[in-house]
Amino acid sequence: MDTTERGTRIQDLIGKYPQKESAVLPVLQLLQKEGGNYLSKEAMEVAARELGCSASRVYGVATYYSMFNTKPVGKYHLQVDTCVPGFLHGADDIAAHISKKLGIEPGETTKDGLFTLSKVQDLGSCATGPVVQVNDRYFENMTAEKTDQLLEALKNGGWPDNDTAMKVVSKCGILLNDRSRKDCRTLALYKKNGGYQALETALSMKPEAIVAEVKAAEVRGRGGAGFPAGTKWSFLPKDDPRPVYLICNADEGEPGTFKDRQIMEFNPHLLIEGIAISAQALNSAKAFIYIRGEFSWIADILETAIGEANQAGYLKHVDIVVHRGAGSYVCGDETAQIESLEGKRGNPRVKPPFPANSGLYGCPTVVNNVETLSSVPYIINNGAAGFKEIGVANNYGPKIFGVSGHVNQPGIFEYPMGTPLQEILEAAGGVKGNLKGVIVGGLSVPILTAEEAKGLNLDYDSCARAGTALGSGGIMVVNDTVSIPELALRTIEFYEHESCGQCAPCRKGTHTIKSKLRDLVMGRGKSDDIDLVLSLCKNIKGLTLCPTGEAFAAPVQAMVAKFRAEFEALVKR
Amino acid sequence: MSKNIFINGKGFSFEGEKTVLEVARENGIYIPSLCYHEKVGPANKCRVCVVEVDGMKDLQTSCSLAAADGMKVGTTTEKVLEAQRMVVNLLLSNGNHNCLSCEANGDCELQDAAYYLGIERPPFVIEEHKEREDSGAFILRDPEKCIQCGRCIEGCNRLVVNEVLDFGYRGGHTEVVWDNDMPLDDSNCVECGECVQMCPVGALIAKKGMGRARRWETKPVRTTCPYCGVGCQLDLHVKDDQIIRVTGTEGAQPNMGHLCVKGRFGYDFIYSDERLTTPLIRENDGFREASWDEALNLVAGKFTQIIEESGPDAIAGVSCARSINEDSYNMQKLFRSVIGTNNIDHCART
Ligand SMILES: Cc1cc2nc3c(=O)[nH]c(=O)nc-3n(C[C@H](O)[C@H](O)[C@H](O)COP(=O)(O)O)c2cc1C
Ligand code: SF4
Ligand code: SF4
Ligand code: FES
């Protein structure tokens, strides 16, 4: 790319956003691509000049997000996901295999400059682990043999096929479609199956009427917190002159979670229709889909689908921009996501003010999860009453559960809210081995022992009563081959890596807990360390700037408290 | 209308919009705080300033909590102290906070907090080593002491608007960077030292005072900066008639604590042997020392003579850029109404 072409492309990226600095991530992504998967300081200076911001500001952004390679990497960057789901699926063996095969340790590059090996955090591919991301492509369901084939192919300049096989069951048939069809993501098929009728209905409704219907449906946010979407929408200030922004949260960063991508990758028009209806309801003329950067091919699919919908005239009232993140779990938090969309480091904001009053660019903003927004067309087509026929009281509608870890057939399951855990586990082929514990709502919720998990129904209220949370519905099954101290260490490693570093209890707390758990796992820990970890967890809960503190303190505390004997057994005597 | 809040059971009245921390400070109640600075407002980062509030489940950061009429606040409950101790312990144990050798000893908000909380030494130590950065002419960076409060960054970007500093990296690796993480001396930093003044600990140090006096050994002397007409207010920190450090006077106009590199660090000239200490009168090829009376009489006599011979417009007054506004004002007054000329100028204009 010559400099004029580069300049034009940068200007095009800037043009997508109401404010110039929002283009920092896309501009850096462009420059990294141009630099052969490497973002040099010179490139960052180019970005700072083009975007009119200080060098330190751009540098701060570039070094915040884990997908920017500010040190050169090999031609093929092999990134093995060794976070909790990967760990349960044997990712460590794959990393060790690559290490041995290539003669490099994680973080190193082969002498010929061909391969760099890294261990990375959750890639949102939990049922198909172990997964290796090579540059921006995923290779799932990896075995030692397939890893050899992959390395061989790469050496010869080719790319093998990716094996994405997993169990897919849709009992509701609302959010998931038939992905076996080649044309599953086309507008033509979507329309043939009744797609965009809800939008046509909505466009003839008053915005308040749409909000009222969604409110009546009591659809609870599927991003994790379970806050009713209609209620959130009704918080927007009335008769406000400022523009309203709608952000679709497609960051899907919570380990164990891989549900939103099922909609976006195979049924993209459902989400687009949901966004189009919601934008109409909220009077929003600009919507963003903030998708985690690792899902780059899914972002491409979304852009294609938006193009189709635009051409068909469905998006006259709203401009939808796909914004790719760059590697940060905390950017899944709505206020961090807003900061990130403004081209900043993904540091969560203090609430209040809440986004409904002062969100993106200080304007009223609604952030909703992919699955939440994808439920909206069904609500419009079938009415709130129709939606409430699915699920249980106070927990209505379909829910996508992801099951990973020790089951015979990991995969994705669309079932009514309130379905017994047992039923989902059976759909996933049953537990492999003896169940030790289960984490039902993504890594940030407290683990349940096998005993506690008995008779659990998967809805927000039942999970809360059981002392855990439904969260994102990412279910991780742990059998008795797993050491809980190891699991706790993996858990805190994730949060330590992802902490934005803004507030002291999280920044230093994750680091300290990790170092103590590592001491214990390595057999050099003391009995005091167990109590220290527990007391840190206790005090960190509720003390941090954003919910991340709770998100690591609660699960680590549960692992230590419920399986204390395993930790004690590791103490050096 | 005045409102009331109760802190530890005692009522305090306040006016207008105030935070709990502000009301507490006004009334001499200490709540440890590390990232709040009145010039840049709450940052919500350190979480040390927490208090317990009746009717609220979680602890609240007093630096950002608006005081409300009738609010009941506890600053010394066991829950508060336990949380504060944890944070301060975490900060102390994940860095190199050796007060014995630290330049900020006695003037450190972390030390104050630890002392208040009765922390003798951190209960655990996490080994980490970060190099000091010594490239700057006047500022030393010691990242091992940095507590990531962000005050230096806010000062650089929002107060003096030099836009050199920001946070780089993430999580436990978060660090203050100069431009794109370059040595201070190679960066666009002008070393105005605002960051040093904002730093609550000893992570940014004015090099000139290093090893010469601890904070309690110096006496502050308030003065006006002699460098230019802005008239910045500063405090000289003096020991044995020697300036150890200079800080801008917080809360005082016109500079509200900000200084430029000259005002903060360029004070050595006062110790120069070549400084004039008496008037000098030029005679033949050189100068001779004279008394003020003699010198002023000579000048007055010459002025009178020139005015008599050639009129007052043969004289012009030029004031020095280093004089304060009041002196420049008096100079023109003298020339206009006493001497009778409008020939007035200022050296910075020429
Ligand atoms: C650290 C953190 C990470 C989060 N990650 C996600 C995420 O990946 N996807 C998501 O939809 N919500 C995530 N959330 C929740 C969002 O802040 C927000 O509540 C949600 O997107 C709102 O959408 P909903 O009401 O439709 O669920 C996260 C929250 C926190 C604190
Ligand atoms: S809790 Fe962690 S992630 Fe949240 S603001 Fe604090 S440091 Fe950042
Ligand atoms: S250098 Fe000082 S002012 Fe800057 S972030 Fe660190 S502790 Fe705070
Ligand atoms: S002073 Fe309040 S959070 Fe730091």
Image (spheres, rainbow, N blue to C red):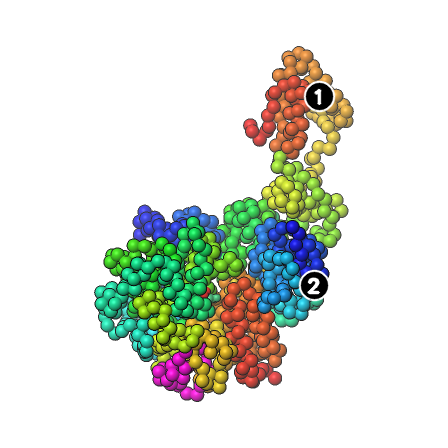
**Classed neighbour count for the residue bearing mark 2: other residues with Cα under 10 Å, few (<14), some (14–19), many (≥20):** some
User: Magenta stretch: residue A426 in it?
Assistant: yes
Residue farthest top in this picture: B309
The image quarter containing residue A562 is bottom right
Q: Nearer the viewer, residue A397 or A139?
A: A397
Residue A328 in the image, given as x and y percentages of width and height: 44, 64
Question: Which corner quadrant of the figure contains ligand 4?
Answer: bottom right
Give the residue drawn at x 71%, y 21%: B299
Give the residue drawn at x 49%, y 61%: A348
Horizontal side of A74 relative to B80 (left or right) equals: left
Give the residue drawn at x 50%, y 80%: A466
Q: Are dots 2 and 1 in contact, CB under 8 Å? A: no
Residue matched to label 1: B299
Residue matched to label 2: B8
Which portion, as a residue range, is magenta?
A418-440
The disc label shown at residue A415, or none = none
Q: Earlier in the sequence, mark 2 or mark 1?
A: 2
Q: CA gap, disc 2 to disc 1? A: 68 Å
Ligand 3 closer than 8 Å to label 1 CB: no
Residue B220 in the image, given as x and y percentages of width and height: 72, 47
Q: Nearer the viewer, residue B158 or B268?
A: B158
What amino acid is at disc 2?
Asn
> In this rendering, is residue A487 above or below A301?
below
